[in-house]
Image: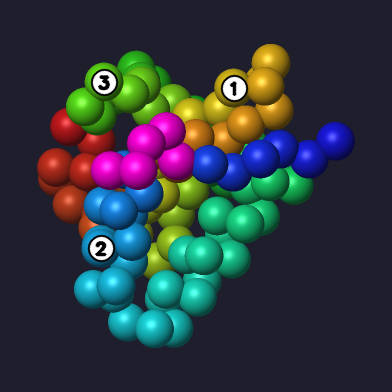
Amino acid sequence: MSYKVKFPSKSREGEFAKLLSKIPADIQDKILAAVEDLAKNPRPYGNPKITPPISISQYAVNYRIRIGNYRVLYDIDDSKKTVWIITLRLRSEKTYK
């Protein structure tokens, strides 16, 4: 059974869209494809769980996917079959803080 990919709030969705709009179009397409693929496989091979989990706003982030120099940080609710997209970040020293 596939998962639903959602944002936990409208503000998180708006922030994601704003950050995405600043990225070159070819990378945007790869990021959107990777996010859509999370519905089929929320724990892709080669993208380990974040240990310890980080907190962004009031949300816990346990997982990440890497797309070039960008990271999509998300969490999974297996009981509701939902992947919660928390944020998009450019890989830097501050990505996981």
Label whose residue precedes the other's in the sequence (1 or 3): 3
Q: Is mark 1 in CB contact (under 8 Å) with mark 3?
A: no
How far apart in space, not on screen, are marks 3 and 2 (Cα)? Answer: 20 Å
Looking at the picture, tell me which residue is in the foreground, 73 or 5: 5
Magenta span includes 92: no
Q: For numbered disc 3, what is the local secondary structure?
A: loop
Q: Earlier in the sequence, mark 1 or mark 2?
A: 2
Please report the residue visible at 33 percent of the width from the left and 23 percent of the height from the top: 59
Residue 18 numbered mark, or none: 2
* Nearer-the-camera pick, 83 or 90: 83
Residue ID for mark 3: 58
Mark found first going from the N terminus, 3 or 2: 2
Q: Which residue is mark 1?
A: 77
Instruction: Work out whether 49 lies above or below 31.
Output: above
Residue extending farthest front: 10
Spatial distance from mark 1 to mark 2, Cα to Cα?
A: 25 Å
Q: Which residues are the magenta region? A: 7-11
Residue 65 picture location, percent across and down = 48, 48
Residue 44 visible from this viewpoint: no
Please provide percent x and percent y for residue 28.
42, 73
Relative to 12, is 76 above or below? Answer: above
Picture coordinates of residue 73, whole percent (x, y):
39, 41
Q: CA distance from mark 1 to mark 3?
A: 16 Å
Q: Quadrant of the C terminus?
A: top left
